Amino acid sequence: MTVAWRKSSYSGNSTDEMCVEVGGLTGGVGIRDSKDPDGGRLTVSGAEFTVLVGRIKRGVFDS
């Protein structure tokens, strides 16, 4: 299966910054590190991804 990975338009073009990429999968969403595209990947359901994005937008993970 070929996955069309994409990263946020808010990400800069700098290769120094860490960024995640997401890709649509059958039955879920794949998440990977853009600086290590051949490394590990996380797969979550569409519902879990929606919850994660909502928590990020609310600042739940901000330090």
Image: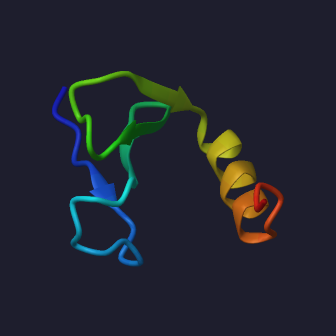
Percent position of residue 58, x then y: 81, 69
Image: 41 above or below 58:
above
Q: Residue at x 60, y 34 (%)?
A: 45
Quadrant in the rendering for residue 17: bottom left
Q: Residue at x 70, y 50 (%)?
A: 52
The mark tally for this picture is 0
Q: What is the quadrant of the N terminus in the image?
A: top left
Q: Residue at x 30, y 75 (%)?
A: 12
Name the image colouring. rainbow
Q: Is residue 45 left or right of residue 30?
A: right
Q: Residue at x 16, y 33 (%)?
A: 2
Q: Is residue 15 left or right of residue 18?
A: left
Percent position of residue 38, x then y: 21, 26
Percent position of residue 56, x then y: 71, 61
Image: 42 above or below 18:
above
Percent position of residue 47, x then y: 69, 44
Residue 21 vs residue 35, the one in the foreground: 35
Q: What is the quadrant of the C terminus in the image?
A: bottom right
Query: From this viewpoint, which residue is outermost toward the top?
Result: 40
Q: Is residue 51 left or right of residue 42?
A: right
Query: From this viewpoint, which residue is outermost toward the left?
Result: 2
Image: 7 above or below 31:
below
